[in-house]
Each structure stands twice: as structure tokens, then as C-alpha cells.
Image (cartoon, grey):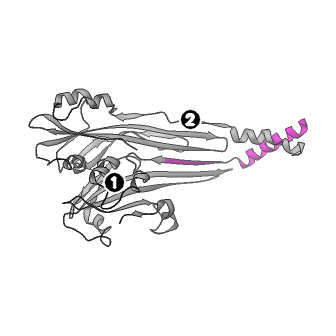
Amino acid sequence: MRKVHSRAVATVGIAAAVLGGCVAFSVSRSENWIPEERVRQIVPAQTTRKEILDWFGPPAAVVRHGQLLQVPEIGVRRMGGRELQADAFFELFAERVPAGETDVIYYYQSAEERATALRVVAVGTASSDLHENRLWILFDGQTWKLKDFVHRRDHPVAAPGSPANVGTDEPVRGM
Amino acid sequence: MAADQRGWLPAIGALISAGCILPVFPVTSGRTLDKESMTAIVPGEATTSVLLKQLGPPLAIAARGQYVSVPAASAVRSGGASCNVESGGFFNIQSDGWFEPFSARRPIRDEHRVYYWYGSRTSGFNAYLLVGFANRCTTTTDELLVLVDTQTDRVEDVFFHEGD
């Protein structure tokens, strides 16, 4: 029996030395994370502006037609700034709801960095992706009725509609 | 199970259980936004001096329509085997977003300013196992916005958002 034990330990030891590898997973989540459960509670024409502000806090940008706006770089930290064209945001809703001149978009952004690494003997591979988590909420700027919303959790290298962007990453839309 | 097969169990058990899980050391930045400090700020009564006495200097003061630069919060990001703290730098933001919680309740005038504070904290874990490691690094930020009328020098409204 003792001989069997010794053989087993020795075999495992040799296997570990020969294969000598390891695997690593990591997730880094940004501040101002957009909670999925709250997004699912948004109901166009019912959810109020106050509820949106209570759930998600002050927006990263309040967007009106024709504006050039500045928001922090999207990443694990709120850092720096980048300019965005407001009209590009309104395009998200162009085919969904009739556009209004006074429409306002609340824009929220957050991100998650996911990294994996694998090493076997002397060969290793590693990858790191930034997954953007963004929310656009369209209001009628006069009545403050919530008209529509778009939520996207994008895989950075996948095309829209690809398997990487469905399931949990599936864009959630209102109306 | 045969006796010679049972001989593997201690070795496999050792492989699986070897390692440890450690929490990420918490790092805070900005201002700790405790309830006690905030309850002293009574809208309509508190003056700017009371506000500053309770919370210290704000991280930013903004008029509507301004772009402001705010010191960035410390955050944790995975640096491979563990969550590492990153600090320093600034972020630029449009102040209009800060006025939204207040403009929903009252008209915003030229003499209004938003005083801005945040309190940020890190959390997560580092798991070190024999054949690998995993970590989760999270930064949570609470935000406090106070609307001040610069003519009367009084706090008009307060908005607090607790980070998820």
C-alpha cells in the first residue's frame, strides 16, 4: 500500500513538472457600472426621469440635437475625455420612434475588462478584451416621457449580431 | 474502489485544495460619503460654509453648460496575478448631467452651481491555486451632488447616488 502511495505521488509530481502550466482568469469592472437588473425594469412611457436618475445616477452626458459633447474615455477608470457627435446617438433611435426636435438622450457608459492566460511548459498565450456596457435613454424633452432606450453590452471584436453579441450580451431595446 | 486506485486520492486532493483566496485590500479615494455628514446638509437651511465644514472642499464646482475636469478615482484593475490599484489623472465631463437631478425639480438659474463629491472604494478577490489563478477587481463609486445658489449662499437641493 505504501508503495502504491509513493508511486502515485511521484507520478503526479513528474506530471506537474513536465506539463508545468497554469491558467489565469480575471475580470476588472469599472466604477459607475450599469446594473442589468435595473435596465430590465425600464418601460417606455412608464418609467420616469426621476427613476432613471435614482437607478443610474447622473448621466455621463445629456445629449441634444446638433451638439458636440465630451465624455470620459470608456474603460475600467473614468479617465481623460473624448468628443462625440450627438447626432450619431439619435441615429440609434431613428428607425424606432418619430424624432422630435426637443428630444434628449441620457447617455451612460461603463466597462468590464476580461483577461485570460494559459501557459503549458514554456508556451503561453494571453488575451484581454474591454467589454463596453452602454445605455442610451431617449426622452421627449418637453414632457419628459421616456420614448425608447438602447442597451448594449458589446464584445469589442465581434460584429453586431454575431454569437458574441447575443445571449447575455444581446442588445436590449425598449418599446 | 480498488486499493491501488485509492492511492491517488491524497495526491488529487492536494492538487485541488492547494492555494488560497484573498480579498482585495480596500482602497478608498475621494470623500467617504457617510450618512452623518450628509444629514447635516439641510436644503434651504445649510450655508456653503456648513457644506464645506461637513464635506471639505468639493472635487469640482460647475455652472450649467460647462466642461469640468475632475480628479479620477483610484480603481483596481487586474495586472495578471492580482488586482492592482491605479491612481492619478483626471476625467473631463459635461456638467449638464450633474444638473439633471435638480432641473427635474426646479428651474436652473445662472447663479446655480453644483458642488460635486464622490467616494470610491475597491473590492474583489484574488484566488491563487496550484495550477492557476483568478481574480475579480471592482471599483464602486458613490456620488454626491449639491445645488448651491451663489446669490443666497445656501444649499438648495441634494442628490446622492449610491454606486452599484
Main SS class of the magenta portion in the image? helix
Q: Residues within 10 Å of mark 2 (few under 14, many from 20)?
A: few
Q: Residue at x 45, y 47 (%)?
A: A29
The residue under label 1 is: A108
Quarter of the picture containing the N terminus of chain A is top right
Most foreground residue, B163 or B5: B163
Question: Residue B6, how many percent across, how many down?
Answer: 84, 42
The part of the image, by quadrant, that contains residue B40 is top left
Q: Is residue A14 left or right of residue A117?
A: right
Question: Residue B149, how many percent across, how many down?
Answer: 13, 39
Say whether residue A9 is magenta.
yes
Q: Residue at x 86, y 41 (%)?
A: A7
Most foreground residue, B3 or A103: A103
Q: Amino acid at mark 2?
A: Leu
The disc label shown at residue B22, or none: 2
Quarter of the picture containing the C terminus of chain A is bottom left
Q: Is residue A101 left or right of residue B28?
A: left
The chain carrying label 2 is B
Say whether residue B11 is magenta.
no
The disc label shown at residue A149, or none: none
Over which residues does the magenta segment extend?
Answer: A1-27
Question: Residue B4, how many percent across, how many down?
Answer: 89, 43
Question: Residue A51, how many percent across, how many down?
Answer: 31, 50
Q: Amino acid at mark 1?
A: Tyr
Describe the element under mark 1 as helix, strand or loop. Answer: strand
The chain carrying label 1 is A
